């Protein structure tokens, strides 16, 4: 991920977290299923779903603890400092686990005898179902969180059956990732591209022109699943944001194994056969792909905001960013997950103050902090200030467009705990010509249903 607050190394670590999120979620699901995961007892119902809440923090000293992954520490510390400036009687102490174990450790931390007051969660439906999180409905009413964009609220809600996207609210994010196409401006100019493509037809024409000119049309490190991004782009366009999100959120009878989805994946198969990805894409990881794109080896690079700082540093004014084009007449839809999806553990000692911190995350001060850290901000409002002409500025503008279109879509790799491996391996086989779109989708759906016990 990016930015002026997060170092390039920690940014790359967090970007890697997104690419392997399914693995972390797997461990988290497994641990949360153990009873009790932290050796503590389940909180009382009144702790998990308070009704008597207050938005007033008074003047007495309040101490809170925030729990997150270490790669997000700089962002969190900046948010904490801004919050403490607004509420000088509140002190928040950060607690951080390494990114590669934070997801596994989270259930035990949440269920411990002395849990934090604010904690990032990934496998939301599982820990909410175990009663480890505070039901935030009363705070949502008090703070008018229903005013948030519906596409964001869906990422915070879980119903009694464990289906995300609906039901009670349990989290509120500090910001979001956003994905799209980075492009090399010099190479684009050689092809006569003066503005980003607005339709899929325009994008496909540019890919064909790039291949004919001897350029790599799309740089991708498919050893770590980057072609899955373009595959989901086609699925988003074919099925729509709502349908893809319902599948990721485990809606009853949801399936991705449909003729419409197969037709969408055919395009990726065609692109691979036409040489639109590098020949060694399955042997190249995301870090290698990033470096090769920065060195001018390709016209486009489909990735997320986590790569913006490195590309800004290495390419300067020569790099641009745009959302993946939508079908003509449709609104844009692209992958956009929470950066830190914060919950209030049911055992928190001061839920009112913790809820005030969550509400602060949608303030203009917090939105600016998050944008400075290279993420897209929570809520909606004026686009935060960025360096004019920077790729970060382009990302913020693109995200504002995405929020207005209500087009945020969850990553399909994260639909269940084991699907990252399935998606990556199946898309690698698709690129190699070892499987068909129909067989790929059938394999993914089998794994999905197996893990959900359907």
Image: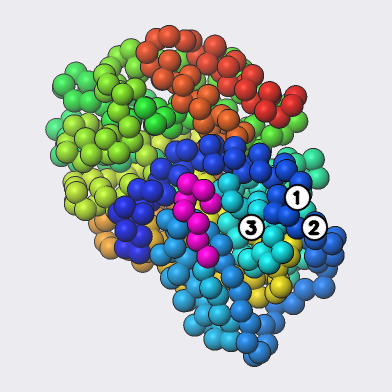
Give the magenta-colored segment's residue range.
95-102
Q: Quadrant of residue 439?
A: top right
* Cα distance between the residues tagged 1 and 3: 11 Å
Is 45 or 250 nearer to us in this picture?
45
Classify mark 2: residues with Cα within 10 Å, few (<14), some (14-19) or many (20+): few
Residue plotted at (64% across, 19% down): 446
Q: In which quarter of the image is residue 193?
A: top left
Badge number at residue 41: 2
Give the quarter of the figure containing the C terminus: top right
Q: Disc 3 designates what residue?
A: 109
Image location (x, y in percent) of residue 308: 31, 50
Q: Tag 2's secondary structure?
A: loop
Residue plotted at (73% across, 54% down): 39
Count of marks overlaid on the render: 3
Q: Tag 1's secondary structure?
A: loop
Circles 1 and 2 in contact, beta carbons < 8 Å: yes
Image location (x, y in percent) of residue 190: 14, 33
């Amino acid at each position: 991920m990016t930015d002026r607050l997060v170092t390039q190394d920690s940014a790359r670590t967090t970007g890697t977290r997104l690419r392997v999120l399914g693995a972390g979620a797997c461990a988290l699901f497994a641990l949360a299923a153990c009873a009790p995961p932290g050796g503590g007892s389940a909180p009382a119902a009144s702790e998990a779903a308070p009704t008597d809440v207050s938005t007033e923090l008074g003047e007495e000293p309040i101490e809170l603890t925030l729990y997150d992954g270490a790669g997000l520490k700089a962002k969190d510390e900046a948010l904490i400092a801004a919050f403490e400036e607004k509420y000088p009687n509140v002190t928040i102490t950060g607690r951080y686990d390494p990114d590669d174990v934070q997801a596994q450790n989270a259930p035990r931390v949440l269920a411990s005898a002395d849990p934090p007051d604010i904690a990032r969660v990934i496998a939301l439906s599982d820990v909410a179902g175990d009663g480890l999180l505070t039901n935030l409905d009363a705070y949502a009413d008090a703070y008018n969180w229903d005013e948030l964009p519906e596409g964001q609220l869906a990422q915070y809600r879980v119903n009694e059956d464990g289906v995300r996207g609906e039901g009670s609210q349990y989290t509120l994010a500090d910001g979001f990732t956003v994905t799209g196409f980075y492009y090399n401006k010099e190479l684009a100019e050689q092809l006569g591209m003066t503005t980003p493509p607005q339709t899929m037809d325009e994008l496909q024409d540019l890919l064909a022109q790039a291949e004919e000119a001897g350029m790599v049309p799309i740089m991708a490190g498919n050893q770590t699943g980057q072609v899955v991004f373009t595959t989901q782009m086609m699925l988003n366009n074919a099925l729509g944001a709502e349908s893809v999100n319902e599948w990721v959120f485990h809606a009853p009878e949801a399936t991705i194994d449909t003729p419409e989805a197969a037709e969408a994946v055919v395009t990726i198969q065609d692109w691979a056969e036409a040489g639109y990805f590098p020949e060694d894409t399955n042997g190249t990881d995301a870090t290698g792909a990033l470096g090769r794109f920065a060195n001018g080896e390709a016209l486009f690079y489909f990735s997320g905001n986590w790569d913006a700082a490195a590309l800004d540093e290495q390419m300067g004014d020569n790099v641009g960013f745009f959302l993946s084009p939508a079908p003509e007449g449709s609104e844009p839809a692209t992958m956009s997950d929470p950066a830190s999806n914060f919950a209030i553990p049911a055992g928190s000692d001061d839920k009112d103050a913790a809820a005030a911190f969550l509400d602060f995350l949608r303030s203009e001060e917090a939105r600016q902090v998050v944008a400075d850290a290279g993420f897209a901000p929570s809520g909606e409002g004026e686009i935060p200030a960025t360096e004019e002409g920077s790729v970060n500025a382009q990302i913020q503008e693109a995200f504002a467009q995405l929020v207005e279109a209500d087009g945020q879509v969850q990553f399909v790799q994260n639909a269940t705990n084991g699907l990252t491996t399935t998606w990556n391996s199946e898309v690698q086989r698709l690129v190699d010509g070892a499987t068909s779109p129909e067989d790929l989708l059938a394999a993914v759906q089998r794994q999905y249903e197996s893990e959900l016990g359907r």
